[in-house]
């Protein structure tokens, strides 16, 4: 495992630096590293690390979500309102609709198989989007109209919505029926996640304040460890309560971080945010290299140009959904265009569930996995590069406040 970690860090960082020199997003170098080192090309990664790959990716995602929560200003998010809520479900719904309408004729699948494919492909990647939105908030790009806050909030909820739909469609493809409770669980999961995170964040802040009042100073580095530990527990609660009630662990983590920011002094929350930013330097490499390692490059060869066409058409449907979400807002054309670009990348969810239909023995399993792999290879670099190249042209940088 140590050799595998050494390869992940050293080769991943080297490839990321090379891409940076070529004015490409670092993520591309990390994804390529994962594909090359992974079991489907050079097979240099130990089985022990691949077996815990999903958990390591989740840990990395938690770190960037904590950083996001500590950078998020709730008053800015309140100003956004309706568009932030719509961004969590409308673009994904439009993309699934695109697959439902067009995939049967383009890829030769049934309607329900097209719906399963759309649900796999419908989720935006928080792993690609969230770090860039955090960076924009730190550098005050688009914050005047709360654009990065809106995209960050939408991307965090989008996955829950899509995964619930995926479970429902897979059940229908196996001969089952849609369950109304599955759809009811979407808002329940979001609400309970936010409430649970807020409650835990308040308790944590009380703990830190009480310790300080009794002159038991908790160093910021120790606070990071405590917050991380509690975050892992919040993610575990989602699993513990599965089958009883739906709770979004990821939203609970973001909500907890937001409450910690509100109840802490600005100096403390800023220091915590900086420390999670430093942790992200290592977590980012692990996340994207392991996402790349989960990509079975062989399936892209069987997908063909029809799959590429389907992905591009579905992205057009998705962009229409994003445009609808920001209709009636103060955003100008360039800002709306940036929102569309920010909602293109796919990676984490597709790597996690792309192979599920194949493992379940569904007839569409191989084509779903092929399209999912191809979507990661096309949209993750496309969205990352698009955001990196356009944010300075499309968004206004707010002046530094003293």
Image (tube, rainbow, N blue to C red):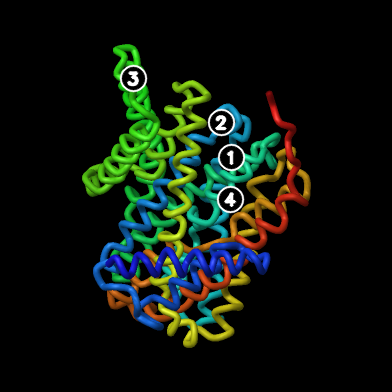
Q: Determine the image quadrant of residue 202.
A: top left
Q: Image check: 5 left or right of 121?
A: left
The answer to which of marks 3 and 2 sits earlier in the sequence is 2
Q: Image check: 277 left or right of 146?
A: left
Q: How far apart are marks 3 and 2 (CA)?
A: 20 Å
User: Which of the two residues, 97 or 309, is positioned nearer the viewer here?
Assistant: 309
Which numbered circle lies on residue 64?
none
The answer to which of marks 3 and 4 sits earlier in the sequence is 4
Which numbered circle lies on residue 73?
2
The residue where tag 4 is placed is 132
* Image: 263 above or below 196: above
**Foreground tag (3 vs 2):** 3
**Foreground tag (2 vs 4):** 4
The residue where tag 1 is placed is 149
Crowding at dot 3, Cα within 10 Å, few <14 / some 14-19 / many 20+, comes out as: some
Name the residue: 32% across, 24% down.
Answer: 203
Which numbered circle lies on residue 206?
3
Q: Distance between the residues labelled 1 and 4?
A: 11 Å
């Amino acid at each position: 495992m140590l050799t595998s970690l050494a390869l992940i860090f050293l080769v991943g960082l080297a490839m990321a630096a090379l891409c940076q020199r070529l004015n490409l997003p670092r993520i591309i170098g990390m994804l390529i590293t994962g594909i090359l080192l992974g079991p489907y090309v050079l097979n240099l990664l130990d089985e022990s690390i691949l077996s815990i790959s999903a958990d390591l990716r989740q840990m990395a995602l938690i770190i960037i979500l904590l950083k996001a929560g500590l950078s998020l200003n709730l008053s800015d998010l309140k100003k956004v309102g309706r568009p932030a809520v719509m961004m969590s479900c409308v673009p994904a719904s439009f993309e699934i609709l695109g697959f439902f309408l067009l995939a049967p004729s383009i890829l030769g699948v049934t309607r329900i198989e097209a719906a399963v494919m759309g649900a796999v492909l419908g989720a935006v990647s928080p792993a690609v989007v969230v770090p860039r939105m955090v960076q924009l908030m730190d550098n005050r790009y688009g914050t005047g109209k709360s654009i990065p806050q809106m995209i960050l909030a939408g991307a965090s909820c989008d996955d829950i919505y899509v995964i619930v739909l995926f479970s429902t469609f897979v059940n229908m493809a196996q001969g089952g029926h849609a369950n109304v409770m599955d759809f009811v669980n979407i808002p329940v999961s979001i609400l309970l996640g936010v409430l649970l995170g807020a409650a835990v964040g308040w308790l944590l802040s009380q703990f830190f304040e009480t310790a300080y009042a009794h002159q038991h100073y908790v160093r910021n580095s120790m606070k990071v460890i405590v917050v991380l530990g509690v975050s892992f527990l919040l993610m575990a609660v989602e699993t513990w309560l599965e089958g009883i009630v739906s709770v979004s662990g990821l939203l609970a983590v973001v909500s907890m971080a937001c409450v910690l920011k509100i109840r802490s002094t600005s100096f403390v929350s800023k220091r915590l945010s900086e420390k999670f930013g430093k942790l992200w330097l290592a977590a980012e490499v692990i996340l994207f290299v392991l996402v790349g390692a989960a990509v079975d490059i062989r399936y892209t060869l069987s997908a063909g140009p029809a799959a590429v066409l389907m992905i591009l058409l579905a992205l057009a449907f998705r962009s229409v959904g994003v445009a609808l979400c920001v209709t009636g807002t103060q955003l100008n054309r360039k800002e709306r265009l940036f929102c569309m670009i920010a909602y293109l990348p796919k990676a984490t969810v597709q790597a996690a569930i792309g192979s599920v239909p194949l493992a379940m023995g569904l007839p569409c399993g191989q084509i779903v996995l092929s399209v999912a792999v191809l979507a990661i290879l096309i949209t993750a670099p496309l969205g990352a590069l698009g955001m990196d190249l356009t944010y300075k042209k499309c968004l206004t940088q707010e002046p530094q406040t003293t």
